[in-house]
Every structure is written in structure tokens, then in C-alpha cells.
Image (cartoon, rainbow, N blue to C red):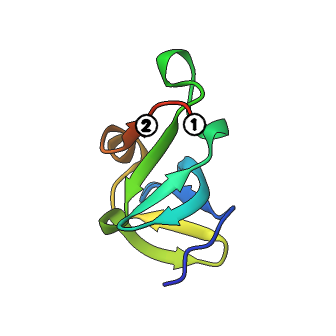
Amino acid sequence: MVIKEHMEVIGADGVHVGTVDKIEVGRIKLTKKDSGEGAHKGHHHFIKRSLVADVEGNKVRLSANADVAVTMEEETGRG
């Protein structure tokens, strides 16, 4: 499974989680535009690659529903 920049990341339920910014060792870095509002705004979020179930066309499908995957994200500060 090849994951590339700008692919859409969706939960097992088909709900949008984010957009791939880049791939790092063991995790997918999402773009800041998908970071949400409030305290999360302007931060990069990461999804563990172990949550990837499949790559379908230009979409990365996770093994967890979007609402669960978001709670498993790692977050970094601005930068």
C-alpha cells in the first residue's frame, strides 16, 4: 500500500479524517487545514500507520471509525 501526499484519510465509516501532508516513520502527518478549531487549530495531527486498513484510489481507509481515529491522533505544536 503506497500512501502519498494529498491523499484523503477516511475512517472505516467513510467519514473524512484529514489529508496526508507527508509520511513519517510509522505515522501519517495530516495537513494543518484539517486540524480543527480552538486549541487544535494550527497544529499538525498524526495517525499511526497501524490504523491503515487499505488504500483505495486516492483515499487512505482506516480500520477505525473517524470519531475513534481522531481520539488516537498524536498532536504536535505549531511548526
Question: Which of the labelled discs sits on residue 79, or is there none?
Answer: 1
Q: Position of residue 66 (x, y in %)?
A: 43, 47
Q: Secondary structure at mark 2?
A: strand
Side of 4 relative to 17 (left or right) = right
Which is in the foreground here, disc 2 or disc 1? 1
Question: Which of the labelled discs sits on residue 76, or is there none?
Answer: 2
* Residue placed furthest toward the top: 38
Q: Position of residue 64 (x, y in %)?
A: 33, 56
Question: Which of the labelled discs sits on residue 33, or is there none?
Answer: none
Side of 50 relative to 29 (left or right) = left
* Contact flag, marks 2 and 1 (Cβ < 8 Å): yes
Image point (60%, 68%), residue name: 59
**Which quarter shows the C terminus?**
top right
Which amino acid type is marked by label 2? Thr
Q: Position of residue 33 (x, y in %)?
A: 67, 37
Side of 66 relative to 34 (left or right) = left
